[in-house]
Image (spheres, helix red, strand yellow):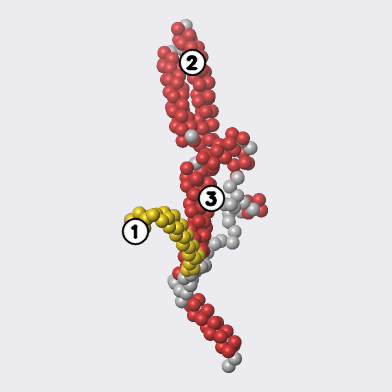
Amino acid sequence: MNSKVYFLLVLLVGLIFTQACKVGPNYQKMEVPLEDSFRFESTATAADSVLNIRWWSNFNDPILDTLIRFALEENKDVLMAAARIEESRALLGMAKSDLWPKFDYMAIYNNGNVINGVVSDQTNQLAMGGLGLNWEIDFWGKYRRATESERAKLLSNEFGLRAVQMSLIASVANSYYTLLDYQMRILISEKTLQLRDSSLYIIEQRFEKGIIPEIDVNQAEIQRAIAAAAIPLYKRDFAQTENALS
């Protein structure tokens, strides 16, 4: 048999053996049964996905845009999720570097007149240098599996960041419009109180003239008290929602 053919045959068998001796089994993706179509699915909604998170722009509200942009830049959960991505990228780079040779170098220079703790009349100079090479061949696939693991963690952290962003955006939008709702309720309650005051004044005047019974005055006073009690309640809810948004 030709020596070159024999060498190639041995090399091929070695590669096959090396692949067969990887640490751990190959990753098997889980098959999840999904429906072919979903309810209310249309051409317009089919183009949207979880990757498109700018849905709030449909409201055309510059204040909401500012709040969401500020939240995405300053929210601590988002910053932590982004930091985890950078950490995963660094770990992935370290795992990849283990597959290749490592070079080490050393350089020492010393100038003095002390030798082994004894002072000498002569000045001695010492210079040393060295270069090393270390390469652990990934025969059993340890570093390849580690690289696959770090790559999966990076992908997981990237989707984790997107999940945090979507949750934060929904929370900001919900708090903002809840805040506007309480603001409108306070305005309506204050106007209602003004109407109840005017109505109570009219009813009291009619009672003094003997036109209506006293029970009508009592009912008007109750309605006026209900309107007055609603204002501090909505103001408290407004403050709590504003704090949550902050």
The residue identified by callout 3 is: 162
The residue identified by callout 1 is: 116
**Residue nearer the viewer, 118 or 27:** 118
**Residue nearer the viewer, 109 or 206:** 109
- 205 lies left or right of 6: left
Label 1: few (<14), some or many (≥20) within 10 Å?
A: few
Q: Secondary structure at mark 2?
A: helix
- What residue appears at the point 46 percent right and 33 percent down from the top-left corner? 243
Q: Quadrant of residue 63?
A: top right
> Residue 119: image x %, image y %?
35, 54
Label 3: few (<14), some or many (≥20) within 10 Å?
A: some
Tell which tag, 1 or 3, sits nearer the viewer. 1
Looking at the image, is 106 positioned above or below residue 25?
above
Tell which tag, 1 or 2, sits nearer the viewer. 1
Q: Is residue 150 visible?
A: no
Looking at the figure, which quarter contains the N terminus?
bottom right
* Residues marked 2 and 3 touching at CB (< 8 Å): no
> Residue 132: image x %, image y %?
48, 67
| Sequence-wise first label, 1 or 2 | 1
Q: Is residue 182 visible?
A: yes
Q: Residue furthest right?
A: 43
Q: Give how far apart the Cα atoms at labels 1 and 2 are.
A: 101 Å
Name the kind of residue labelled 2 in the image. Asp
Q: Give how far apart the Cα atoms at labels 2 and 3 are.
A: 52 Å
Count the numbered circles shown. Answer: 3
Name the kind of residue labelled 3 in the image. Arg
